[in-house]
């Protein structure tokens, strides 16, 4: 019998009471994994109320104790690492290795959250004026919320709620309704780590649920990862409602290949970064820009991509799994067809890929285009599938200009053995995350995830030091203490100026 996906509200797992239902299916087999009933309006309000009530006590918990919760949590995540990854494979269709990477990159953020005492330290200056000291410290905001996508159902929730909660906030998590099972497991382990009731709440729903949360007066901050279209709506809705909002959005990431690059290392990196995870990464390389003679390597890329095959999560020979849904596959194959129609040369076409042992899966094989131009749909749109577009330019300056004309600026990379070329690239490129001989430069969590331009809306980015600033406010205190008996008894004259004296 198919089990129901549970919500977690005020310390209790409950079934949804909304009017909308959905079946959760395995993208590789279409097997029904669970039944999901969305939260009702009343349940959403209950979750926020629970978080608000819990905040009154949670904010007073000493910072070291909040850090110890994160220490216990990361230990549990590590001990259940493979269990979470296996759930994730069924949720998303990812291969086991890819799923384990998803979980591990989330664990790294929880480890960083355990450093919260140091991360929340303020500043002090003695004697800013005569006998006056000024110091600042950080305080939590209140109830925060997170909206997470289907493609990283472990890592991205772990980007959000551990940092927010470690800072002293409480949290309402709304994961993608396509992959709810991983989030439930993350919550179960957080409870086991000792999280009090109400500190973390889990709500399943759709756009109407998100809209209700964004307009709720008791929520102070919202974090989102997903498409540019949805992110723009969330940013506008949340900020209009007076909330602090960060939106990590779409991308079109380019890899620049210089003629002097190490060929084998470059080709291996390009293959993995373009079709790994079926291309369903916001940091995937979807465009390879070959400078000068490097374009002669394109036939070898075709040879390597032709050897790559998707497959089941537990197939050790599978490079990646299916795309998330039939709708996603239809969109990808439509864009492939449109690319051919618009004049690009399709060296590999994965539109009709099938896996005999899993014929119902949402399979798309590796796809490779050349002769791509900036006016084509396969260049302008984020395909979010295992599709690599190849372009050729004469110089590094041309490559930089091409990338800088994009509206988005999530990630980019350059492969070269020339230090000067690398420095020129990293200095001039208008992209937030740059890899030098690293194809997918997602920073470790003591830095922050720093997409630019159309890939981000907000002022402060995810995890790292910027997350602490996002989830806290700074309070500055200016204090004068006197000890002299004469001063304490003297009346003095009132200070009619704003000067400190």
Image (cartoon, rainbow, N blue to C red):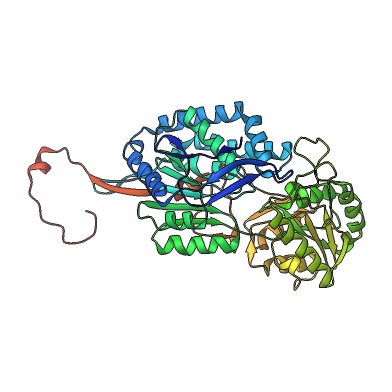
Whether residue 438 is visible: no
Callout count: 0
Q: Position of residue 443 (x, y in %)?
A: 63, 46
Query: Horizontal and vertical percent for residue 78?
Result: 60, 29
Q: Position of residue 155 (x, y in %)?
A: 60, 42
Q: Quadrant of residue 125?
A: top left
**Residue nearer the viewer, 15 or 158:** 15
Residue at x-position 71% and y-position 53%: 284
Residue 380 drawn at (x, y percent): 71, 68
Q: Would you say 366 lies left or right of 423 here?
A: right
What quarter of the picture does the N terminus occupy? Answer: top right
Residue drawn at the location 63% of the way across and 59% of the way down: 250
Q: Nearer the viewer, residue 87 or 61?
A: 87
Lateral position of residue 378 relative to residue 224, left or right: right
Q: Is residue 169 above or below residue 406?
A: above
Taking depth in this image into account, of 491 and 190 the one nearest to the observer is 190
In-image side of 191 versus 24 (left or right): left
Give the residue displayed 41% in from the left and 38% down from the top: 199
> Does residue 129 appear anywhere in the picture?
yes
Residue at point 24% right, 45% down? 479
Vertical relation: 262 (above or below) 452: above
């Amino acid at each position: 019998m198919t089990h129901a996906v549970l919500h977690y509200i005020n310390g209790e797992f409950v079934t949804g009471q909304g009017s909308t239902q959905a079946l959760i299916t395995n993208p590789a087999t279409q097997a029904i994994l669970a039944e999901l009933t969305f939260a009702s309006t009343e349940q959403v309000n209950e979750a926020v109320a629970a978080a608000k009530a819990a905040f009154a006590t949670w904010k007073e918990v000493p910072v070291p104790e909040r850090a110890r919760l994160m220490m216990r949590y990361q230990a549990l995540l590590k001990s259940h690492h493979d269990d979470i990854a296996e759930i994730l494979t069924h949720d998303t269709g990812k291969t086991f290795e890819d799923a384990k990477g998803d979980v591990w990159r989330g664990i790294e953020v929880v480890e960083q959250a355990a450093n919260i005492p140091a991360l929340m330290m303020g500043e002090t200056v003695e004697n800013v004026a005569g006998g006056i000291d000024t110091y600042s410290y950080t305080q939590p905001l209140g109830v925060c919320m997170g909206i997470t996508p289907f493609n990283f159902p472990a890592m991205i929730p772990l980007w959000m709620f551990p940092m927010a909660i470690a800072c002293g906030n409480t949290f309402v998590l709304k994961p993608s309704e396509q992959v709810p099972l991983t989030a439930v497991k993350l919550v179960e382990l957080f409870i086991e780590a000792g999280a009090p009731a109400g500190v973390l709440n889990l709500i399943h729903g759709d756009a109407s649920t998100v809209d209700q949360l964004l307009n709720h007066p008791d929520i102070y901050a919202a974090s989102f990862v997903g498409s540019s279209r949805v992110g723009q709506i969330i940013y506008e809705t949340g900020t209009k409602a007076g909330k602090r909002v960060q939106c990590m959005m779409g991308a079109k990431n380019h890899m620049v290949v210089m003629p002097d690059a190490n060929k084998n290392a470059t080709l291996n990196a390009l293959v993995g970064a373009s079709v790994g995870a079926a291309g369903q990464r916001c940091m995937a390389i979807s465009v390879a820009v070959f400078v000068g003679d490097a374009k002669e390597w394109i036939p070898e890329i075709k040879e390597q991509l032709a050897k790559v095959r998707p497959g089941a999560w537990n197939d050790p020979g599978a490079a990646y799994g299916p795309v998330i849904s039939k709708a996603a596959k239809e969109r990808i194959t439509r864009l492939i067809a449109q690319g051919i129609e618009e004049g690009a040369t399709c060296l590999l076409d994965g539109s009709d890929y099938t896996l005999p042992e899993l014929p119902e899966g949402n399979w798309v094989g590796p796809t490779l285009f050349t002769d791509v131009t900036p006016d084509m749909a396969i260049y302008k749109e984020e395909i979010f599938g295992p599709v690599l577009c190849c372009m050729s330019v004469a110089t590094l300056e041309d490559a930089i200009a091409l990338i800088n004309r994009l509206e988005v600026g999530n990630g980019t990379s350059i492969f070269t053995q020339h230090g000067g070329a690398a420095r020129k690239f990293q200095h001039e490129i208008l992209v937030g995350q740059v890899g030098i001989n690293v194809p997918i430069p997602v920073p470790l969590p003591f830095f922050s995830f720093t997409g630019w331009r159309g890939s981000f809306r907000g002022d402060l980015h995810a995890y790292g030091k910027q997350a602490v600033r996002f989830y806290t406010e700074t309070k500055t205190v200016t204090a004068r203490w006197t000890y002299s008996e004469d001063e304490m008894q003297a009346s003095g004259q009132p200070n009619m100026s704003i000067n400190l004296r």
